[in-house]
Amino acid sequence: MYQTRLNLLMQGSNVHSKFQVVSYHYQRISSSQYLLLMQTMVHSLKLRNQMQHSHSQRRTQCIISPIGLLDKL
């Protein structure tokens, strides 16, 4: 019986600590500064991916058609 009560107390403290962690992250995510930071990071990642994609397309064109490289210069 003592073991069962101890387990229940430990489970209760685990739930309480998980609730604190979730609350903390919710407050952090809901702050406008954090949202602005996340939007900025997503925007920069999109730009980087677009630049890498266009660079790889140009490189593929040059490999396939060396004359295309001279046209672009």
Image (cartoon, rainbow, N blue to C red):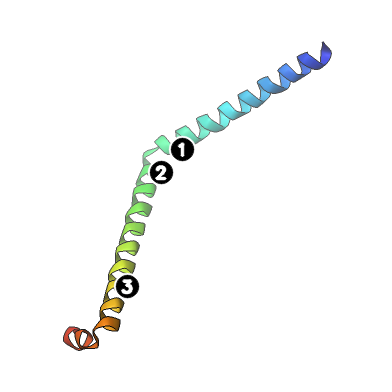
Residue corresponding to mark 3: 56
- Asked if 15 appears above or below 2 in the picture, the reply is below
First reached walking from the N terminus: tag 3 or tag 2: 2
Asked whether residue 73 is in view, the answer is no
Asked whether residue 70 is in view, the answer is yes
Q: Amino acid at mark 1?
A: Arg
> Residue at the location (50% across, 36% down)?
25
- Asked if 13 appears above or below 1 in the picture, the reply is below
Query: Residue 18: which disc?
Result: none
The part of the image, by quadrant, that contains residue 31 is top left
Nearest to viewer (mark 3 / mark 2): 3
- Asked if 42 appears above or below 54 in the picture, the reply is above
Answer few, some or many: residues within 10 Å of disc 1's Cα (few below 14, many 20 plus, some between 14 and 19).
few
Mark 3 and mark 1 in contact? Answer it, CB < 8 Å.
no
Mark 3 and mark 2 in contact? Answer it, CB < 8 Å.
no
First reached walking from the N terminus: tag 1 or tag 2: 1
First reached walking from the N terminus: tag 3 or tag 1: 1
Residue 68 lies left or right of residue 50; in this view the side is: left
> Residue at the location (27% across, 69% down)?
54
Residue corresponding to mark 2: 34
Answer few, some or many: residues within 10 Å of disc 3's Cα (few below 14, many 20 plus, some between 14 and 19).
few
Q: Position of residue 8 (x, y in %)?
A: 72, 17
For mark 2, give the secondary structure: helix
In the current view of this chain or complex, which residue is farthest to the front?
64
Nearest to viewer (mark 3 / mark 1): 3
The CA span between labels 1 and 2 is 7 Å
The CA span between labels 3 and 2 is 33 Å
Residue corresponding to mark 1: 28
> Residue at the location (46% across, 37% down)?
28
Q: Position of residue 73 (x, y in %)?
A: 20, 87
